[in-house]
Image (spheres, rainbow, N blue to C red):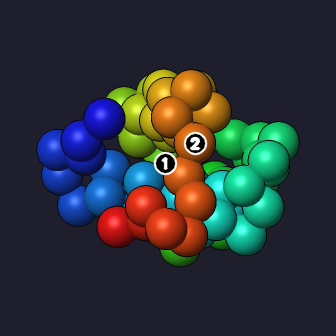
């Protein structure tokens, strides 16, 4: 799942970092959202975050295949 703008890239990066910290992570959307420096997430940012976390759970990341 490829981000299409700067906010989505930051969201994906934050999510990947959470999943790398604990590959079996049950990181929640809230955990990831609070780690971002956005003052306010737009509805589209929030939707991307939810979709990305769901996608990442289906496509696990590990240190050997991280970006």
Say whether residue 36 is visible: no
The answer to which of 27 and 48 lies nearer the viewer is: 27
Mark 2, Cα crowd under 10 Å, few <14 / some 14-19 / many 20+, is: some
1 and 2 marks in contact (CB < 8 Å): no
> According to the image, label 2 marks what residue?
60
Give the quadrant of residue 12. Answer: bottom left
Of tags 1 and 2, the one toward the viewer is 2
Q: Earlier in the sequence, mark 1 or mark 2?
A: 1
Q: Residue at x 49, y 48 (%)?
A: 41
> According to the image, label 1 marks what residue?
41
Q: Which element type, helix, strand or loop, lies under badge 1?
A: loop
Say whether residue 54 is visible: yes
Give the quadrant of residue 62. Answer: bottom right
Outermost residue toward the left in this view? 4
Residue 50 vs 26, above or below: the answer is above
Q: Residue at x 32, y 50 (%)?
A: 8
The answer to which of 29 and 46 lies nearer the viewer is: 29
Mark 1, Cα crowd under 10 Å, few <14 / some 14-19 / many 20+, is: some
Residue 1 vs 19, above or below: the answer is above
Q: Residue at x 49, y 68 (%)?
A: 64
The answer to which of 5 and 16 lies nearer the viewer is: 16
Q: Which element type, helix, strand or loop, lies under badge 2?
A: loop
Residue 3 vs 22, above or below: the answer is above
Q: Where is residue 2 drawn, in percent x and y?
A: 24, 41
Q: Quadrant of the image for the N terminus?
A: top left
Q: Which mark is residue 1?
A: none
């Amino acid at each position: 799942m490829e981000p299409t703008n700067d906010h989505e890239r930051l969201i994906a990066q934050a999510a990947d970092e959470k999943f790398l910290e604990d590959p079996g992570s049950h990181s929640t959307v809230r955990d990831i959202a609070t780690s971002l420096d956005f003052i306010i997430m737009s509805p589209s940012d929030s939707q991307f975050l939810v979709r990305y976390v769901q996608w990442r759970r289906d496509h696990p990341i590990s240190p050997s295949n991280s970006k």
